[in-house]
Amino acid sequence: MLYQILPDGTSNLSVLEYEMGVDGNSYIADFMALYLNERAVGASTADLKLLYEHFCTKELAEELSAATIPIVSDDTDFRHADRTLQINNLDDLNGLPLEKYSFEVKFKPNPNDDNVTDILYMEVNGATNKISKIEAGERKVI
């Protein structure tokens, strides 16, 4: 669970659901939950930078802080995206440990249209357990 105290003094509780035991999976889920919640409450650039520095490699944190990589589009309903978050491991885990772990991150960006899914691709460095890559995938319409 993620318990968040909001700038106006109220609180928010989110239940995080993800597969345990897969390297990087919970790390991606924690990052995305915190990121989407921070965006939902209008977190400052400095707060987002702290989040990036904690979860990402130095290089990726710098890119994200400079806003050169979009994680989600600005038209996203961040609360809805958080509630519909799905994380899928893309690796064959028979040869553990891996140098990097790849994940597909899916979410519904808008509560008014269940036919739309946004997809991101993320990698976690197996040695440092930091997110090393985020690629905006695509927006699929069913």
Image (tube, helix red, strand yellow):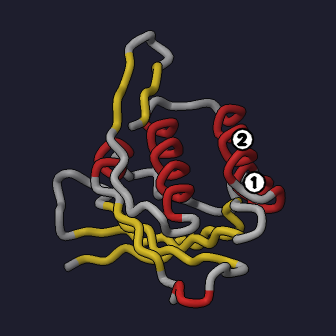
Locate the C terminus and report the quarter of the image it occupies. Answer: bottom left
Q: Residue 116, percent across and down?
A: 25, 68
Judged from the image, the secondary structure of the residue bearing numbered disc 2 is helix
Please report the residue visible at 33 percent of the width from the left and 53 percent of the height from the top.
17
Does 94 appear above or below 86?
Answer: below
Q: Residue 56, percent across and down?
A: 71, 56
Looking at the image, which is closer to me, 96 or 142? 96
Instruction: Give the residue number, with chain letter if any, for mark 2.
Output: 49
Query: In the picture provided, is 63 more to the left or to the right than 15?
Result: right
Locate the N terminus and report the quarter of the image it occupies. Answer: top left
Measured Cα–Cα span from mark 1 to mark 2: 7 Å
Looking at the image, which is closer to me, 44 or 17? 17
Instruction: Give the residue number, with chain letter if any, for mark 1.
Output: 61
Query: In the picture provided, is 62 more to the left or to the right than 123?
Result: right
Please report the residue visible at 80 percent of the width from the left and 54 percent of the height from the top.
62
Does 129 appear above or below 48?
Answer: below
Q: Name the quadrant containing residue 79.
A: top left
Mark 1 or 2, nearer chain start: 2
Say if mark 1 contacts mark 2, CB within 8 Å. Answer: yes
In the image, what residue type sits under mark 2?
A: Lys
Judged from the image, the secondary structure of the residue bearing numbered disc 1 is helix
| Mark 1 Cα-neighbour bin, 10 Å: few <14, some 14–19, many ≥20 | many
In the image, what residue type sits under mark 1?
A: Ala
Query: In the picture provided, is 93 more to the left or to the right than 79?
Result: right
